[in-house]
Image: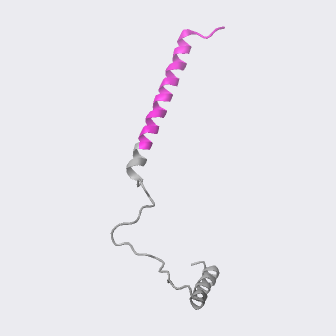
Amino acid sequence: MGISYRRLMEVLRFLLLFITCTLLSYGIITLLSDRLLPSDPYQEPQGNAVKVVKLVNAPETQDLDGYVARLQLFYLTGE
């Protein structure tokens, strides 16, 4: 009741085919991700980019009250 030579060759052929298909699909996925995803997603935008937040450069206390009010509004509305 040993393993026949034919059965061993079928198993080896299956493993070889499985490993080949796995490496081929990994290569295709890697190639597609390199082509589709940006190389540096956190780079500074180019073109007509708009800055969302405009900070006020004044360390006075009356200006900090405005920040506190905006923070409270953010906590209340979530926007």
List the single residue furthest toward the bottom: 62
Q: How far from the left and from the top, in percent, is residue 21?
A: 46, 32
Q: Is residue 6 above or below residue 64?
A: above
Up-down relation of residue 12 to residue 70 (above or below): above
- Residue 28 is one of the magenta-drawn residues: yes
x, y percentage for residue 2? 64, 8
Q: State how the image is colored.
A: one colour
Prevailing secondary structure class for the magenta stretch in the rendered image: helix
Q: Where 41 falls versus 7 (above or below)?
A: below
Q: Say if the magenta span includes residue 26.
A: yes
| Placement of 30 over or under 66, stated as above or below | above
Residue 23 at x, y percent in the picture: 46, 33
Can you name the residue that lies furthest to the left here? 47
Residue closest to the eye, 13 or 53 = 53
Q: Residue at x 50, y 83 (%)?
A: 57
- Assign the N terminus to one quadrant of the image: top right
57 or 68, nearer to the observer: 57
What number of labels is visible?
0
Q: Quadrant of residue 3?
A: top right
Asked if residue 20 lies left or right of residue 69, the reply is: left
Q: Residue at x 33, y 69 (%)?
A: 47
Measuring 43% from the left and 48% from the top, which residue is drawn there?
33
Which residue is situated farthest in the right direction here? Answer: 1
Furthest residue in direction top, as rendered = 1
Q: Is residue 66 left or right of residue 53?
A: right
Looking at the rendered image, the quarter that the C terminus falls into is bottom right
Stretch of the chain drawn in magenta: 1-30
Residue at 55%, 9% (x, y): give it.
5
